[in-house]
Image (spheres, rainbow, N blue to C red):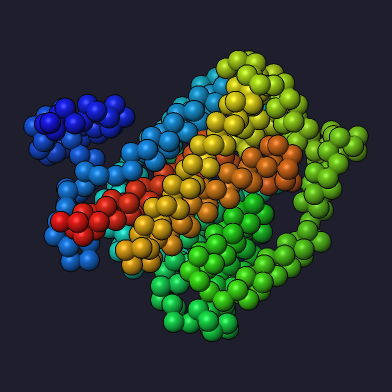
Amino acid sequence: MNTHTARLKNPLQAAWQAAAQAIKGLLPGRGNRDGGGGGPLPVRDHINVGGARPVRLLAFDQALVAVVGALLLLGVVMVYSASVALPDNPKFQNYTAHHFLVRHVVALGIALVAALVTVQIPTAFWEKHAPWIFVAALMMLVAVLFFGKVVNFSRRWIPLGVMNFQPSELAKLAIAMYAANYMVRRMDTRDSFFRAVTPMVVAVAVAGALLLQQPDVGAFLVIATIAMGILFLGGVNARMFFLIAAVMIATLALFLAFDDLRRERILAYLDPWNPAYAQGKAYQLTHSLIALGRGEWFGQGLGASVEKLHYLPEAHTDFLLAVIGEELGFFGVASVICAFFWLTRRIFVIGRQAIALDRVYAGLMVQGVGIWMGAQAFINMGVNLGVLPTKGLTLPLMSFGGSAILMNLVAIAMVVRVDVETRALMRRGVS
């Protein structure tokens, strides 16, 4: 069986190879070395992992890339559907019906280019520079407090012209990289409570304090979850988790004690249909539940949502799942949930494979990305379904938001890179 025939055995692989070849043809100085229909992913042709001989980067997790692509495409469709009527609102009267779609597609294009660049960078580079990337993320969290753009009483974005960058998105990836790097460097201190616990508690506390100043409680919860998850997977002493959890709970308690707005959100979540909250702090939640209820099993049809017509605020960002539920029904929501479950599980499998080959940093960083994607998707879905209080977190890979899409795809590109390097090492072991 020749190479061309083998490729046709897998339609998904053939489609991806064709797309990769088309992209490769647009790049300068990149010819088709295979001489047939299809070529390698447009990244470096060879890598050298741990002294191994160079191996062509032809193998990668195609199912992972396909699921990510499906979520991105569904996100584009639903962002357009959820935002097409916004210009009817006086707040957006100067916008066209395609304004948010165009911005989302432009951000997605930038993110895809960044992902293609990222997948060419060896994982060893990120391991070496992880502490400095975390420091840069902290500096940006400080900068946003002075130069940030205020939206809905929160100062979370730094205007960059093309997009408004949200430093908390970089912080999520940075904490995953830093925690994995920390565990590799301090592997011998895992059983020493104070030596192991102090740096990570300080890191989480500093990041949390800066995030709560914006305020962004949701991002703080995600970052703390990533840090605790990586420490747990790295095998640190269990007492560390009680201390970090205590610090996180105490910080949140102090924050809620002095923030009437967030405290009222908690109370509204507990009783959303109370007349005192239904038209106030629980307004988004009640209309999200109405949208999901209207969707029933199969939905009202694509584009037929009523709640997006100025009843449900932020339908194209935080509450995109509610619009999916109203237009595509229970099966649409269930499909999205299953896709995120599969994606998170697959990322963890890639991380375990890397750790099994003694690539501890790569494995822990990948699993940190899995925790990030899974935890944020869970929180966003929980908010939309009324299971959790409103947090202001977007649905990864799908919701409108340039910096979120950018950092999501950069993180996924790192996962793909680790998978490619792991496959190269496995081939070396077999050959």
Apparent side of residue 135 relative to residue 14 in the rendered image (left or right): right
Dividing the picture into quadrants, the one containing residue 321 is: top right
Q: Position of residue 329 (x, y in %)?
A: 63, 23
Count of numbered circles on the image: 0
Seen from the viewer's position, the closer of residues 89 and 64 is: 64
Q: Position of residue 187 (x, y in %)?
A: 43, 77
Q: Position of residue 86 (x, y in %)?
A: 62, 23
Q: Residue at x 25, y 44 (%)?
A: 59
Q: Position of residue 347 (x, y in %)?
A: 43, 50
Q: Is residue 82 above or below residue 261?
A: above
Dividing the picture into quadrants, the one containing residue 185 is: bottom left
Q: Is residue 424 visible?
A: yes
Tell me the quadrant of the picture where the C terminus can be found.
bottom left
User: Furthest-right residue in view?
Assistant: 275
Seen from the viewer's position, the closer of residues 191 and 183 is: 191
Q: Residue at x 69, y 18 (%)?
A: 306
Q: Is residue 292 above or below residue 241?
A: above
Seen from the viewer's position, the closer of residues 78 and 379 is: 379
Q: Residue at x 45, y 53 (%)?
A: 348
Apparent side of residue 144 relative to residue 73 in the rendered image (left or right): right
Q: Is residue 146 visible?
A: no
